Image: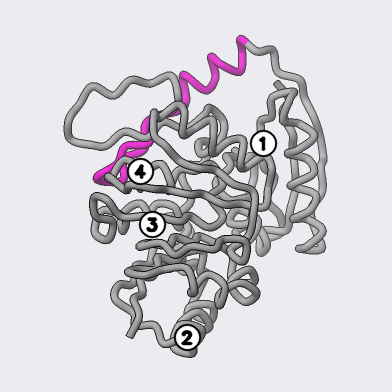
Amino acid sequence: MKKLIYRLPTHLFEIFAVEFNGYGFEILNRNKDGTTFVIYAEESEEEAIKEAVNEIFNELGAGELVGEEVIPEENWVDKWKEDIKPIKIPPFIVLPEWEIYEGKDFIPIKIKIGMAFGTGLHPTTQMVLKLLPEYISKGDTVLDVGTGTGILSIAAAKLGASKVIGIDIDEMAIKECKDNSWENEVNVECIKGEPKDIKEKFDIVIANLEIKIFRNLFKDIVKLFKKYLILSGIFKPAEKEEILKMAKENNLKLITELSQPESDEKLSDIWFAFVFCRK
């Protein structure tokens, strides 16, 4: 196991967190100038993770790898098993892969160690998990654009969706989607591709993406849903107004809006999620 230590200007960190799409990290230090954080990588994933991070850093024009440490496997497992606790987002409870949920109050979702955990699930993921039970009905077909770890696809399948496809352009994301789907004993088809590659329509389309991706893909995404379009990844009021304008231009009606701060320490940094239908 390798501990990869990165540093990034703090004002860009939230954008990185969304772009990294659900994968876990641990924040070591954060101030107004910079954020130092750790990503834990198994040997088989190290190069792919480095490549993914470097690609995002290149897009942001900042960020660097400042250190690497090898962690003995037994220490890694002990550390995470001691520190990681289940995350409750009713009706779901998100668990590390070794946990067994024996209760009846929540729907369990297991995620591979080191992926969604570390700083907890991102606010955008939490909001979509809260929205899914209200808008997914048993038998619905679901497309998850930018599936990442597959957590939203898995949630949709556990709610009774008859067909779930998760797409992503990242090979590592597709592997994690497949692994996590298998761990949760659900049938999710994880495919490398973009919205333009999809030729069928779905009852529900989910897209938890960065605003710059919506700028390029919004029209392609809109074509793919029949009942509801669930969007998140929108940061602060300016991006909110931009996504609402895109929706209006594509004849969509806003049904639901959620908002959640980045953290208790950053209450002014607000993330948004929306549900749209056709007019």
Exactly how many numbered labels are in the figure?
A: 4
Secondary structure under tag 2 reads: loop
Q: Is residue 137 above or below residue 98?
A: below
Magenta stretch holds residue 90: yes
Frontmost of labels 4 and 1 is 4
Which contiguous range is marked in magenta?
74-96
The residue carrying pointer 3 sits among few (fewer than 14), some (14 to 19) or many (20 or more) residues within 10 Å by Cα, namely: many
Whether residue 31 is visible here, answered yes or no, is no
Whether residue 207 is visible here, answered yes or no, is yes
Mark 4 to mark 2 CA distance (whole Å)? 28 Å
Residue occupied by mark 1: 39
Secondary structure under tag 4 reads: helix
What residue sits 31% from the left and 33% below the top? 108
Mark 4 to mark 1 CA distance (whole Å)? 28 Å
Q: Is residue 174 above or below residue 126?
A: above
Residue occupied by mark 3: 128
Q: Amino acid at mark 4?
A: Ala
Secondary structure under tag 1 reads: strand
Frontmost of labels 2 and 3 is 2
Name the mark on residue 157.
4
Quarter of the rendering occupied by the N terminus: top right
